[in-house]
């Protein structure tokens, strides 16, 4: 009995030691990744895109039509019968359960938060059509890029959609508003691969200034101002 209790205590000690080390490493990565910047900001460019945040989650907003691509070819307007316009599209990647089950913060449950943070989980793309670019504010940053970077960004975002027969897979009746929808996505969401890590990787792919490993929205937005 005493021996079993001894092993139990030792196991608990090792677990707490491991957890503390993990927590310290994660906090270091979280803050250092946010603070150290990579890439550059251009003062002009062929295309203006926007990065916007709700304080927690970030999205990338870009023109619907260009000489390079038309987003309506993979996000058909028939999926958005109540949208008021199709001039810009706002796109983000994130945890599927969190996206679909938490339209408002009041809907957040403990199980949803734990699953999103600690368990590799399925993901979804959130897309919203806009009639005009986002209104500039502390939550919106305009970014200038050239056509080469624009093409790379389009490819990166397209690659994040899970396709079936070369078509995006709509998740029906899950949009928050009149102009948005969710689609099946590639990849798994977890503590080290958050919605903001996706935005951060997209910006790094096109050489735009951002955090070197940003897991939070501030680790992105603070570098774009």
Image (cartoon, helix red, strand yellow):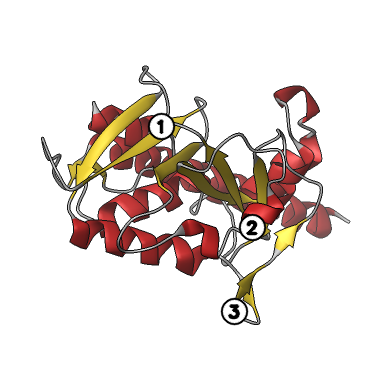
Q: Secondary structure at mark 1?
A: loop
Foreground of the two, 187 or 147: 147
Pair 1/2: label in front: 1
Quick one: 57 or 137, which is closer to the camera?
137
Crowding around mark 2 (Cα neighbors within 10 Å: few <14, some 14 to 19, many 20+) is many
Q: Please name the residue shown 34% across and 36% down the image.
A: 220
Sequence-wise first label, 1 or 2: 2
Closer to the eye: label 2 or 3: 3
Work out whether 63 lies above or below 85: below
Front-most of residues 213 and 157: 157
Q: Which residue is farthest left? A: 43
The residue at the point 37 percent across, 17 percent down is: 137
| Sooner in the amino-acid sequence: mark 1 or mark 3 | 1
Q: Element under label 3?
A: loop
Q: Position of residue 189 (x, y in %)?
A: 59, 55
For label 1, the residue is 133
Which secondary structure lies at badge 2?
strand
Pick out the residue farthest to the right.
1
Label 2 vs label 3: CA separation? 18 Å
Q: In screen coordinates, is 121 left or right of 138?
A: right
Crowding at mark 3 (Cα within 10 Å: few <14, some 14-19, many 20+): few
* N-terminal label among 2 and 3: 2
Residue that carries the numbered disc 2 in the rendered image: 123
Position in image of residue 5 (x %, y %): 81, 52
Which label was assigned to residue 166? Answer: 3
Q: Is residue 62 visible?
A: yes
Quadrant where the C terminus sits is top left
Mark pair 1, 3: CA separation: 29 Å
Can residue 209 be seen by looking at this rendering? no
Residue that extends furthest to the bottom in the rendered view of this protein: 165
**How many numbered markers are drawn?**
3
């Amino acid at each position: 009995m005493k021996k079993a209790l001894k092993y139990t205590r030792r196991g608990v000690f090792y677990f707490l030691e491991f957890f503390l080390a993990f927590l310290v490493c994660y906090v270091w990565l979280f803050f250092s990744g946010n603070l150290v910047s990579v890439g550059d900001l251009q003062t002009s460019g062929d295309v203006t895109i926007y990065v916007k945040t709700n304080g927690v989650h970030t999205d990338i907003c870009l023109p619907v039509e260009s000489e390079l691509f038309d987003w309506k070819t993979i996000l058909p307007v028939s999926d958005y019968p109540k949208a008021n316009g199709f001039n810009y599209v706002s796109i983000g990647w994130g945890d599927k359960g969190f996206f679909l089950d938490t339209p408002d913060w009041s809907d957040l449950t403990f199980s949803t938060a734990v699953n999103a943070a600690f368990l590799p989980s399925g993901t979804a793309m959130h897309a919203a059509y806009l009639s005009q670019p986002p209104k500039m504010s502390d939550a919106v940053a305009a970014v200038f890029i050239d056509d080469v970077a624009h093409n790379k960004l389009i490819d990166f975002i397209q690659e994040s959609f899970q396709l079936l027969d070369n078509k995006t897979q709509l998740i029906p009746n899950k949009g928050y508003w009149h102009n948005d929808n969710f689609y099946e996505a590639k990849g798994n969401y977890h503590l080290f691969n958050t919605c903001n890590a996706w935005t951060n990787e997209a910006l790094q792919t096109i050489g735009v200034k951002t955090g070197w490993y940003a897991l939070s929205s501030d680790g992105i937005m603070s570098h774009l101002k």
